């Protein structure tokens, strides 16, 4: 199910009496979420990502804009009719029900569609095949309003009735074109429910806890139950609100792999919300970075990291975060302080001060080119096993210190050091708009 | 994904699965087509129907609430209009929802049978003295239970709480004997009768419980800080805890005062002399049903006089009253 | 520190302990004692010894001789016990269900919510005697009730009333008076339920009624248990409402007044005529019944109540 958000806006009204202004939680959001993908909505708290999720779920009504599931506009549809599974941040498992009953609860409200031989339809079909060659689209004009004795009269009426569909659901002709079927809706039987519940429980690996109450389970297990409850009804879309935030560090790693696996196995379009960039990067097929209700960038996680559109995205992604410097551009040459960093900037760019962002892994020691070196001061060296982290300072650095990640074999000493800068790890942003130049 | 060892261990120790239902192996769940309970109507129709249903259900909820609210409010309304009706109108076979002649004189006349100022005075004396006494004992006890350490604290507190379950009648019988044998119940023994109406009510386990909960919420750090400053417990209690617990104390004060206003059983037993009666007793005994002509107009005027002060108290201290009463249920 | 505080703590507790010793613990034991004394006279403190007859008398197991005939039908067995049980069985479930519905309704609305909330709380701040007298006027034979329901002339509470009528009027009044407290407790319980449970139920396409029965009620079970226990105890002890409706106890021997006779009513009647041994026996039995009911409810709640 492809999901499209068109100009989606949510304004929480303020209180003019108390001088609380309106809050634009989501501002003209346009996103297309491709079918069967796992998408992460990423942003700092207050960026409107949860609001977006709740609007997709139908729990919040958008101020304006549209939400499309495939070719169906669901904007005004109430949540229970959208066919979504939502996993709440704190899971919201019913504490008084066992795990089994928690998972069963959505099923008790669903119906199942069975194909049933359409006896009446088949009769009409036979009648029609015997007497009428082509199905009349309308009553022939010469018969309108006249009481003409007509051998086909009853037949036509029945055919017309048949057109109006005498049973809810469209009749379906079987492959051989001989028998008509209609769908009948009925409740699930206890046995069918049981099978579904157990299958779903197996999928999330909680079969052995079915008779327990949620408070007898660990956080991770509770979360699986919540996912099972969302999945058991075979939703068109699965929504996860901060799925890993209530878990401890080890469980987090494990669970995020599991979410990825579940999504791949079920193929359900999945949207999850997180403020943790690492989490979003590690499992999403695509991430949407949001800031103050506005989409900043949407792409594959690695693309977003490698090619951030603006300073916000560059700063938001990556641990340790990107290092920012004050720089200057003149005739395509980028300098930080007195050091020339790059010479390949567009020539038509006006001379101006800019921000320069260099990823921690973007430093080269020793510098590869003699011409462009970046003279920094090394204050401290932190060993981290696989790499070493170099804490440096520079008079143009925006923060008092910055970090460089280097290979553990690199030989460095505290003190002044000339380093090289990898061009593809070095981004230039305009001072006013914070848009990226290169 | 890999199954971590700790999980496998749990699997072995807790096999709680009751097993799948019989016959479920024959079901192919992939063939089950689950649908949401909606007809094949278009989104617009569903939307429209949802809206209509929502409006209807809202109307039903409001209708129910308004009808119930009218049922609740009707006796008050009836009391007021009856207090302004003539006796003939009250006893007429056609009841009127607004008095034909407004009889303000009912109020003046009712005072002839119902000595409102006297009963009001008595009730205030009993109410205020017993409330102050209760507040003092409650503050001390709640402080001891909330902050101080002593042996048997939990046991004692549990015993206190358990007494709340005992019907008051068990105590009333002996208490009546006690005050009677102490010679407190004489026709002219004003001090004795008033003491009998006040002293037994200087303790309330429920309020001790309420205030203890409140005291417990005050962070320990404040207590230790005051200890470091060299303040005594006494000082800390009055300078820190009591001011912080003021809202609860106000709730207790008002609820207790209301209790005196409404108390009937005990004063009825101990106050034989009509001059010592409290307002509820005064009201009931001024209008006994046995005198042939109940004079409902006057009677209702008197009930208005008894009811209005309480309602005024409620309007002004609504927050404190509802919080004090509502607190009880939170603990469950 | 602990030792130093020890005597101080008892000092703080002294007033409460002394008062409770005199007015709670001593009476409890003494009342139990009196209930086993034959013909106890509190003014002189004399009795004719230990006996179980007080209980037998109250329960109608020991005949009362008057004018040569022995009657087993005491006021307690004939009126007080059946009436009390009727009050309990009728008013407790009825008031809980109505209060629950009102609370759920109130919790679901926003407009004029606080006005309605205030109205629903009003009976709590009224004097039981005063409003009882109002209900007496309403249930007069020419009163509002008969006028509205077209039953003019029916006697509900006076001497001529049938016992069913009298109990009906009494129960109406008791339910009316019992609602506000229950509504308040339920409402504060409802407000503590996490909204996400309702959102989850909505996403699971559970209907309104199903949500009420499967989500709201179970999550409100601690409050429901609390209210059940307190209202069982309260309605076993119904007294003031009777006094409000029909007047001072013991002033009339008319059969009509026995129509609303309750156990506690009997207890106070007995004190007034110096039969504290019967009063004690009745009070002790009431206590035991309440205790049993409470224990049963706690037991049941263990499986049903989610904390």
Image (cartoon, coloured by chain):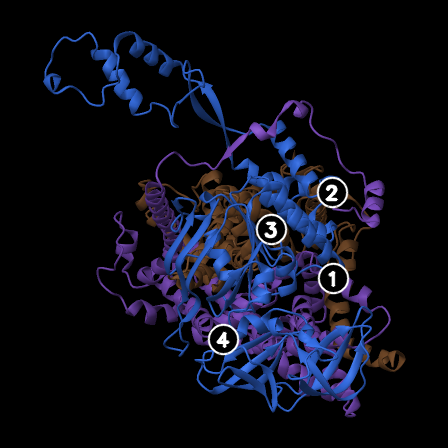
What chain is tagged by disc 1? A
Could you say where residue C200 lies in the image, as x and y percent from the top left? 54, 49
Secondary element type, mark 2: helix
| Residue B265 appears in the figure | no
Disc 3 + disc 1, Cβ < 8 Å: no
Assess disc 3: are there few (<14), some (14-19) or many (≥20) residues with their C-alpha within 10 Å of its C-alpha.
many
Residue B233 as seen in the image, left or right of residue A86 = right
Q: First in sequence: mark 1 or mark 4?
A: 1
Secondary element type, mark 3: helix
Calculate the distance from the C-alpha at mark 3 to the C-alpha at mark 4.
Answer: 56 Å
Check disc 3 and report the residue beneath it. Answer: C219
What chain is tagged by disc 4? A
Which of labels 3 and 1 is toward the front?
1
Secondary element type, mark 4: loop
Q: First in sequence: mark 1 or mark 2?
A: 2
Calculate the distance from the C-alpha at mark 1 to the C-alpha at mark 2.
Answer: 23 Å
Q: Which chain is blue?
A: A
User: Is there one chain holding both mark 1 and mark 2?
Assistant: yes
Residue sitting at the far front: A370
């Amino acid at each position: 199910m492809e999901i499209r958000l068109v100009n989606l806006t949510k304004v929480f009204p303020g209180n003019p009496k108390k001088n609380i202004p309106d809050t634009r939680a989501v501002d003209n959001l346009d996103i297309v979420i491709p079918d069967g993908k796992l998408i992460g909505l990423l942003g700092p708290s207050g960026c409107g990502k949860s609001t977006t999720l709740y609007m997709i779920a139908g729990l919040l009504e958008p101020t304006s804009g549209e939400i499309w599931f495939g070719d169906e506009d669901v904007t005004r549809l109430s949540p229970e009719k959208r066919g979504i599974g939502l996993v709440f941040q704190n899971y919201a498992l019913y504490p008084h029900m066992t795990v089994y009953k928690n998972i069963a609860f959505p099923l008790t409200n669903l119906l199942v569609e069975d194909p049933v031989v359409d006896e009446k339809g088949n009769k009409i079909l036979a009648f029609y095949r015997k007497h009428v060659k082509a199905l009349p689209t309308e009553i022939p004009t010469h018969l309108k309003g006249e009481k003409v004795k007509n051998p086909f009269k009853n037949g036509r009426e029945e055919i017309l009735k048949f057109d109006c569909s005498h049973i809810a659901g469209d009749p379906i002709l079987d492959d051989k074109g001989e028998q008509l079927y209609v769908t009948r809706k009925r409740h699930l039987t206890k046995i069918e429910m049981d099978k579904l519940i157990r299958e779903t429980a197996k999928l999330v690996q909680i079969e052995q806890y079915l008779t327990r109450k949620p408070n007898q389970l660990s956080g991770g297990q509770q979360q699986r139950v919540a996912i099972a409850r969302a999945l058991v009804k075979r939703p068109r879309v699965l929504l996860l609100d901060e799925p890993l935030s209530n878990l401890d560090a080890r469980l987090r790693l494990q669970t995020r792999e599991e979410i990825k696996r579940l999504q791949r196995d079920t193929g359900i379009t999945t949207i999850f919300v997180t403020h943790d960039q690492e989490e979003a990067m590690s499992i999403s097929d695509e991430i949407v970075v949001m800031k103050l209700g506005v989409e900043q960038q949407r792409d594959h996680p690695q693309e977003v990291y490698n090619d951030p559109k603006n300073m916000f995205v560059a700063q938001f992604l990556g641990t340790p975060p990107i290092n920012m410097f004050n720089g200057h551009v003149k005739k395509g040459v980028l300098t930080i302080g007195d050091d020339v960093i790059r010479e390949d900037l567009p020539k038509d760019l006006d001379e101006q001060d800019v921000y320069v962002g260099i990823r921690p892994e973007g430093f080269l020691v020793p510098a590869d080119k003699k011409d462009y070196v970046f003279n920094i001061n090394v204050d401290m060296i932190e060993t981290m096993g696989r790499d070493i982290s170099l804490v440096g300072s520079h008079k143009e650095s925006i923060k008092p210190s910055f970090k460089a990640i280097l290979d553990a074999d690199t030989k460095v000493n505290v003190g002044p050091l000339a380093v090289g800068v990898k061009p593809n790890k070095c981004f230039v942003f305009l001072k006013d708009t914070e848009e990226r130049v290169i | 994904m890999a199954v971590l060892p700790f999980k496998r261990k749990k699997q072995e120790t807790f096999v709680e699965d009751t097993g799948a239902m019989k016959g479920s192996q024959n079901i192919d769940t992939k063939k089950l087509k689950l649908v949401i309970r909606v007809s094949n109507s278009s989104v617009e129709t569903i939307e429209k129907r949802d809206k209509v249903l929502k409006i209807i259900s809202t109307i039903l909820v409001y209708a129910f609430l308004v009808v119930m609210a009218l049922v609740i409010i009707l006796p008050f309304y009836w009391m007021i209009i009856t207090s302004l009706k003539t006796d003939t109108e009250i006893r007429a076979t056609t009841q009127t929802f607004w008095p034909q002649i407004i009889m303000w004189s009912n109020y003046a006349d009712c005072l002839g049978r119902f000595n409102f100022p006297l009963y009001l005075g008595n009730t205030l004396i009993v109410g205020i003295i017993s409330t102050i006494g209760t507040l003092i004992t409650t503050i001390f006890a709640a402080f001891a239970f909330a902050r101080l350490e002593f042996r048997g604290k939990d046991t004692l507190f549990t015993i206190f709480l358990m007494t709340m379950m005992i019907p008051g009648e068990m105590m009333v019988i002996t208490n009546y004997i006690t005050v009677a044998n102490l010679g407190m119940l004489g026709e002219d023994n004003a001090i004795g009768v008033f003491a009998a109406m006040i002293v037994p009510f200087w303790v309330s386990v429920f309020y001790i419980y309420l205030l203890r909960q409140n005291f417990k919420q005050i962070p320990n750090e404040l207590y230790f800080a005051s200890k470091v400053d060299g303040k005594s417990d006494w000082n800390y209690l009055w300078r820190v805890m009591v001011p912080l617990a003021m809202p609860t104390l106000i709730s207790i004060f008002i609820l207790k005062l209301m209790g005196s206003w409404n108390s009937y059983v005990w004063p009825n037993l101990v106050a034989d002399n009509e001059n010592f009666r409290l307002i509820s007793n005064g009201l009931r005994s001024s209008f006994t049903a046995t005198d042939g002509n109940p004079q409902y107009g006057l009677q209702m005027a008197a009930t208005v006089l008894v009811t209005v002060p309480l309602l005024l108290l409620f309007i002004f201290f609504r927050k404190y009253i509802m919080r004090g009463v509502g607190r009880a249920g939170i603990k469950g | 520190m602990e030792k130093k505080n020890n005597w101080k703590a008892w000092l703080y507790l002294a007033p409460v302990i002394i008062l409770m010793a005199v007015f709670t613990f001593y009476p409890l034991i003494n009342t139990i004692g009196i209930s086993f004394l034959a013909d106890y006279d509190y003014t002189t403190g004399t009795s004719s010894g230990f006996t179980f007859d007080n209980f037998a008398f109250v329960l109608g197991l020991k005949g009362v001789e008057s004018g040569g005939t022995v009657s087993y039908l005491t006021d307690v067995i004939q009126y007080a016990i059946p009436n009390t049980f009727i009050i309990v069985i009728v008013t407790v479930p009825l008031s809980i269900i109505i209060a629950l519905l009102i609370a759920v309704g109130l919790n679901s609305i926003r407009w004029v919510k606080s006005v309605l909330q205030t109205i629903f709380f009003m009976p709590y701040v009224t004097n039981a005697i005063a409003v009882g007298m109002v209900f007496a006027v309403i249930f007069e034979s020419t009163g509002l009730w008969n006028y509205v329901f077209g039953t003019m002339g029916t006697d509900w509470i006076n001497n001529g009333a049938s016992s069913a009528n009298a109990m009906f009027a009494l129960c109406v009044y008791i339910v009316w008076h019992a609602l506000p407290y229950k509504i308040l407790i339920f409402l504060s319980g409802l407000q503590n339920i996490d909204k996400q449970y309702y959102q989850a139920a909505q996403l699971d396409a559970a209907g309104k009624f199903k949500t009420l029965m499967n989500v709201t009620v179970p999550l409100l079970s601690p409050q429901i248990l609390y209210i059940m226990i307190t209202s069982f105890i309260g309605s076993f002890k119904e007294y003031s409402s009777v006094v409000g409706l029909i007047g001072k106890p013991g002033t009339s021997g008319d059969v009509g007044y026995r129509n609303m006779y309750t156990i506690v009513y009997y207890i106070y009647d007995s004190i007034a005529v110096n039969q504290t041994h019967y009063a004690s026996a009745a009070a002790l039995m009431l206590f035991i019944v309440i205790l049993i009911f409470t224990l049963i409810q706690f037991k049941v709640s263990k499986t049903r109540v989610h904390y």
